[in-house]
Amino acid sequence: MLGGARRPNYLALACSALNQALRLQARMAKEDPHIFGPHSHQYFLDTLEMEREEKEIEAALRRVYGPPAPGQPERVSTLWTDRYYPKPEQRRLFLKWFHEKYPLP
């Protein structure tokens, strides 16, 4: 009898990869629910709405007060950074707020 190599079990490999992907997704959803969780799309849409409102407010202020003075730095929005990358010292409060605002079904 010849000692030939066994063929790989592709079904077992696929199931293992799928199981690993599901575990990784669950871990990422727990660590960053606003990016990977079930309510991440709604959070994204809310962020877009906030950005639109912020632009409207900025345009209204420019109509009333005019453009910034020469030499004065342009205002840069930090909305996306603040909403998607909370500061480490504020992370626990952010996660608590997120779970209150977007409860799991």
Image (cartoon, rainbow, N blue to C red):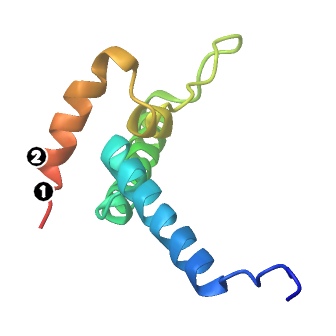
State which quadrant residue 26 falls in: bottom left
Q: Nearer the viewer, residue 17 or 90?
A: 17
Give the SS element for disc 2: helix
Relative to 104, 21 lies left or right: right
Q: Residue, x 64% and y 16% (percent of image)?
A: 73
Q: Nearer the viewer, residue 8 or 104?
A: 8
Quadrant (top left, top right, bottom left, bottom right) of the N terminus: bottom right
Amino acid identity at mark 1? Pro
Please say whether residue 50 is visible from this viewpoint: no
Residue 7 in percent (x, y) is at: 76, 84
Quadrant (top left, top right, bottom left, bottom right) of the C terminus: bottom left
State which quadrant residue 32 falls in: top left
Q: 10 Å neighbourhood of mark 1: few (<14), some, or many (≥20)? A: few
Q: How far is disc 1 from disc 2 in space, using C-alphas?
A: 6 Å
Look at mark 2 in the image and give the residue it sits on.
100
Q: Nearer the viewer, residue 74 or 38?
A: 38
Amino acid identity at mark 2? Glu
Give the SS element for disc 1: loop
Residue occupying the far front of the picture: 1
Please say whether residue 20 is visible from this viewpoint: yes
Do the residues under discs 1 and 2 have CB atoms within 8 angstroms? yes
Q: Residue, x 61% and y 75% (percent of image)?
A: 13
Query: 50 above or below 37?
Result: above
Residue 9 in percent (x, y) is at: 65, 83
Query: 43 above or below 97?
Result: below
Q: 10 Å neighbourhood of mark 2: few (<14), some, or many (≥20)? A: few
Residue 99 in percent (x, y) is at: 16, 46
Residue 103, numbered circle: 1
